[in-house]
Amino acid sequence: MFGLAHDESFVIMVWAIDAAQSGRAQAARRFLSFPKQVAEAKFGERYFVFKWALETLINELLSTKKKALPIGGPTRRLDCTKFSTVAACLNTLRNLEDAEDGIVLSQFTVFNIMHKIGHRQFEWQRGFFSYSQIYRNLTVFGGDLAADHFRSSYQLSIAEFFNCGFAFYALCQDTPGFKTGVNLAQVQLSDHARDRALRLLSAPLASVRKDASSFRQVDGKSTAYQRSVLRKTPILVFGDDVARAPLPSLILQRITSGLYYDLVGGGSRIWREIGTRFENYCVDLAVALLPKTQPAGSFKYKFTKNYDSPDLFLHDENGVANVIFECKAKKMSIAAKFSDDPFASAADAFSEIIKGVVQIWRFNSHCRRSPQIKAIHPESIGVVLTLDPWLQMSHQTDRVFDEARKLAAQIDANITEEDRRSVLFCSIDDFENTLERASEETLIEALRAAVTPEFRGWFLFNVHQQTTADDRRNAYPFGRRIAEIVPGWNAEALSASGSDDET
């Protein structure tokens, strides 16, 4: 089917089905015929199309060679104007994925592959755009060193890149593309900024095809769990001047968390800055939403030599620390996300997460042996708070703790079982989602429950749902600050774009 598909027509078809199920059915009907059940379908219903499957379809399309046209004979093309074509492609893809999963499950249990399913699906279910995702990513990736590196590398500021990307996203709401020379003066963006942003967000079809083939010709990798070319290049350029985004939401991902691609080569100084800014963001978030817990950041202390404490503390009513956070901004590799045995395939990648556990245990030990450092509750909980969702639905937690015990014994033989208290792994997305519904009291209750066997592997948000009947809704505290980072932004910008901000 891909060999018979016209690439531009297929991209438009995928854009249309995405639009039809994103509240823009009227725009979609100009390009695709589909029954009304498609536009009305809810998650899990027969006509609902999973967007992660659409992303896979585009990647497979771009990495498939075209069939040679017959000389003098009839030319066959895939009809990309009907929903039945989408359905046929998706059903074929599902059959392929089921067959590949069967091969994997002959060697591993279903628990070994749950993490891959989560990494592929959950971010699409959460969505890519909210006040928290904008502010957090632009704050964490927007330090002085990172901003200077970005500007010197691309002759564009991060704010201009974000605004251009948002403009391109808006242009792709009612139509499946725009002219690369579109005039953005109405939103105070120069032609120079537009062109520079397009260099980062788009590439000619031939170039993207080459990248897709390279990304996805990996021996032994299942179709569903390979690298997506759309994460770095969400816009495809057809001909000389037509830009098309098959899944416009990926533009939003690229201009927020996708800033990683533009900074990854910036060197260790930038990554230390990113780590520090992530720690500071987590402290600011706790101060804003958990004032009763008297949040406090890290400090230096002396115990045989000088040490840095963990990054964030929450306290009980007596000022005793009952939750200790170590914040880790390390990004996940494709191997860490999608390997059948990620600990074996990406052992080095997990080193920072293991180190986070040990840092909490070591601090507990120091405070036990030298109580004047800080008062720690005897039933305190540790949390490794991560920028990426490292251990969501993962079967690797026991291995992380095993490695942490080995490392702890190597660095300090006096770290005892008493010091090795329960540690929860939680992504910042999960933590923010939980804070949206939690009070200080219900958060602590959920954290205590989350480290028990009953809730092993659960998201903190879902644990909180199970442990409280409180139905409160806390506003994200930093939405108004976005304008300080992105000139021209305002609190109404999301609603004006038609995006549904869930925080």
Image: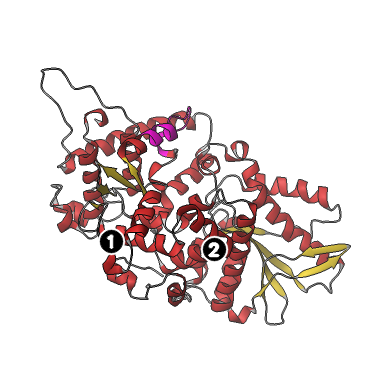
Horizontal and vertical percent for residue 348? 65, 42
Circle 2 residue: 140
Q: Is residue 412 left or right of residue 245?
A: right
Amino acid type, residue under disc 1 in the picture: Ala
Q: What element carries label 1?
A: helix
Which portion, as a residue range, is magenta? Answer: 210-224
The answer to whether residue 399 is above or below residue 269 is above
Q: In which quarter of the image is the C terminus?
A: bottom left
Horizontal and vertical percent for residue 63? 35, 32
Q: In which quarter of the image is the N terminus?
A: top left
The mark found on residue 318 in the picture is: none
Assign the magenta stretch its main secondary structure: helix
Local crowd at mark 1 within 10 Å, few (<14), some, or many (≥20)? some
Q: What element carries label 2?
A: helix
Horizontal and vertical percent for residue 50? 32, 48
Amino acid type, residue under disc 2 in the picture: Val
Task: Identify which residue, 80 or 433, lies in the foreground.
Answer: 80
